[in-house]
Image: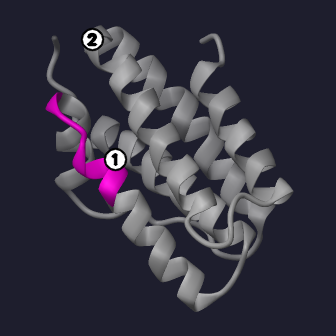
Amino acid sequence: MDRLTAEELLTLRTGAFGAVFLVSNTEPGMFGMIRESSAASGAFAGASGVVKEALTAGPLPQLPRDSALEIESVVLPALTRAVRILREKSPGDVEAYRSVVLAAADRVAGAHHGVTPAEAAVVEKIRVALTEPV
């Protein structure tokens, strides 16, 4: 396994935290957001190795906040790049990253009044971004 650079670790963080933010942003509301962030942190807590390092070290990513499309335009490519980075430098961590991100997205979607169709659509976009051939 090759060591990941700070920029590569930030890409992994941007994808993971961005995915959570994207799902959370689908259904606005402060109370729901608190429940959702708690659900996401539970999923991230189960990470190990390079994935854990990416999610627990370094600065939080700066994400756009203007529109869902703007957020998607940053987050979805970051997820695909993160998988590419892991495939090249730490192939044993690709599935762990995918699993942690999808678990967090699923938990966030279901954290407040069940999964809405809009949340399910966003989770599917995240799933596609994580499995895009690179």
Query: Label 1 amino acid?
Result: Leu
**Decide: marks 2, 1 in contact (CB < 8 A)?**
no
Query: Residue 113, relative to residue 132: is it above or below?
Result: below
Local crowd at mark 2 within 10 Å, few (<14), some, or many (≥20)?
A: few
Mark sitting on residue 92: 2
Which residue lies at the image location 62% right of the left edge and 58% below the top edge? 109
In the rendered structure, the answer to whether residue 79 lies left or right of residue 8 reads: right
Q: Which comes sooner in the sequence, label 2 or label 1?
A: 1
| On-image quarter of the N terminus | top left
In the picture, the quarter occupied by the C terminus is top right
Q: Nearer the viewer, mark 2 or mark 1?
A: 2
Q: Position of residue 108 (x, y in %)?
A: 54, 60
Q: Which disc, if any, is residue 111? A: none
Q: Which residue is mark 1?
A: 10
Label 1: few (<14), some or many (≥20) within 10 Å?
many
Residue 19 position within the rendered picture, expressed as x and y whole percent measured from the top left: 56, 51
